[in-house]
Image (cartoon, coloured by chain):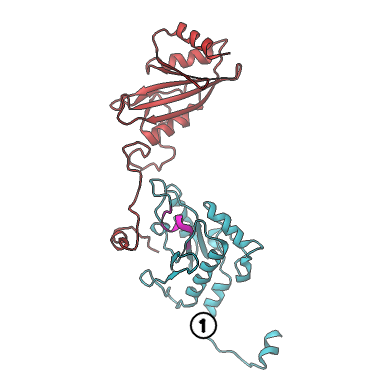
């Protein structure tokens, strides 16, 4: 099965949802609208011929300075045809909410939690949208591009007295 | 047997209680079986036959913190792991000592980011810092020897050294600075 067959079938079923088509190195990437995500995913999973039954990965991306700022990337795989399909959904900074796929693919649960934990993308109707990697009391989302990269000023001989003065050393 | 033949008839030996207690502590200082990252591989190397840490009475790693005297923090400590390490340290019975092995455990190393504790001295009080990324087994054994020398100076009723009394050693061949 080639990319063109898949594309023609999706376009026939959902004429207005695909906003961008990109084919590079033999991989088909489609940008679709947020509202149609669940319908497209369910259609791809349950289609008698295509059978994209495996959600390989859910990834969040932060494109700071672009609109929409956030993007969620899904990779679907069809064991029947050994074919891979990439779907992208954008989410603006003011309303970073994307529908959750946990109802369709249980594997989406932890991967969506990871995207929420590190980037702050929220997934509506997720059964337990909590932090998964960072401690529960952590404030902020550390992989956002506007979070500083370095965590602490590096101590050298010339400035270590100033840094160690306010560093929280442990007591016995 | 051996001692008497070499030294003649000693009759009796006098020493101080502190020396005997500290001698016993240094020569049966059991580390906790605890590895975090690649430094743990070097720690295992130090304990296996090539470097043979059992020469110093340290061949037994205790899996239970209640039976261990020494916590070797070998590797970078993530912020989510930090409460676990503190809990292990609290479960160890006194007297207890801590070695921060490697750059990551000493100061965060190359991981100057949100996920890693910038030096385990924020979590547990450290007695000896061993520099290196990772330190070779010789460096770890050197750190342990320095800890033994420190324990030999301890007084009954409290540790002799505090954080204010630091020993700074610069390694001539590598140029690394070691602070104990």
Q: Give the residue at mark 1.
A: B17
**Quadrant of the rendered structure where residue A126 is?**
top left
Magenta residue span: B99-109
Side (left or right) of B65 relative to B109 = right
Q: Quadrant of the C terminus of chain B?
A: bottom left
Q: Quadrant of the N terminus of chain B?
A: bottom right
Spot occupied by residue B54 in the image (x, y as percentages of width and height): 63, 67
Spot occupied by residue B147 in the image (x, y as percentages of width and height): 49, 70
Spot occupied by residue B157 in the image (x, y as percentages of width and height): 43, 76
Spot occupied by residue B131 in the image (x, y as percentages of width and height): 47, 61
Side (left or right) of A1 relative to B124 = right
- In the rendered structure, does residue B102 fall within the stretch colored magenta? yes
Residue at 41% x, 30% y is A60
- Count of number-bearing discs: 1
Query: Which residue is the extreme one toward the top?
Result: A12
Q: SS at mark 1?
A: helix
Label 1 chain ID: B
In the picture, one chain is red; tell me its letter: A
**In this rendering, is residue B79 above or below A20?**
below
**In this rendering, is residue A18 above or below B116?**
above
How packed is label 1: few (under 14 Cα within 10 Å), some, or many (20 or more)? few
**In this rendering, is residue B22 above or below A113?**
below
- In the rendered structure, does residue A123 fall within the stretch colored magenta? no
Side (left or right) of A47 relative to B121 = right
Residue at 51% x, 85% y is B16
Chain B: its colour in the image is cyan
**In this rendering, is residue B71 above or below B3?**
above
């Amino acid at each position: 099965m080639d990319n063109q067959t898949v594309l023609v079938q999706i376009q026939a079923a959902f004429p207005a949802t695909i906003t961008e088509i990109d084919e590079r190195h033999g991989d088909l990437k489609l940008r679709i609208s947020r509202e149609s995500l669940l319908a497209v995913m369910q259609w791809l999973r349950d289609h008698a011929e295509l059978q994209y039954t495996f959600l390989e990965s859910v990834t969040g991306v932060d494109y700071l300075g672009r609109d929409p700022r956030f993007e969620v990337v899904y990779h679907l795989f069809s064991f029947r045809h050994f074919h891979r399909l990439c779907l992208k959904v954008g989410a603006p900074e003011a309303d970073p909410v994307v529908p959750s796929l946990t109802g369709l693919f249980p594997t989406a649960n932890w991967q969506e939690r990871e995207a929420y934990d590190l980037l702050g993308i929220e997934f509506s109707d997720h059964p337990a949208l909590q932090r998964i990697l960072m401690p529960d009391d952590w404030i902020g989302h550390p992989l956002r591009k506007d979070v500083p990269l370095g965590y602490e000023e590096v101590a050298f001989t010339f400035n270590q007295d100033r840094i160690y003065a306010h560093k929280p050393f442990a007591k016995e | 047997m051996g001692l008497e033949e070499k030294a003649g008839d000693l009759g009796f030996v006098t020493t101080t209680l502190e020396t005997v207690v500290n001698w016993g502590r240094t020569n049966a200082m059991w580390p906790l079986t605890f590895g975090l990252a690649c430094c743990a591989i070097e720690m295992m190397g130090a304990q296996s036959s090539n470097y043979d840490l059992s020469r110093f009475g340290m061949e037994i790693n205790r899996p239970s913190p209640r039976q261990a005297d020494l916590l070797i923090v070998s590797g970078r400590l993530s912020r989510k792991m930090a409460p676990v390490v503190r809990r292990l340290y609290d479960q160890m019975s006194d007297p207890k000592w801590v070695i921060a092995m490697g750059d990551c455990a000493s100061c965060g190393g190359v991981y100057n980011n949100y996920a890693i504790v910038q030096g385990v001295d924020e979590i547990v009080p450290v007695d000896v810092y061993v520099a290196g990324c990772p330190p070779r087994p010789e460096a770890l054994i050197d750190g342990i020897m320095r800890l033994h020398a420190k324990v030999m100076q301890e007084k009954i009723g409290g540790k002799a050294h505090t954080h204010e009394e630091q020993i700074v050693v610069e390694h001539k061949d590598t140029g690394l600075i070691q602070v104990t």
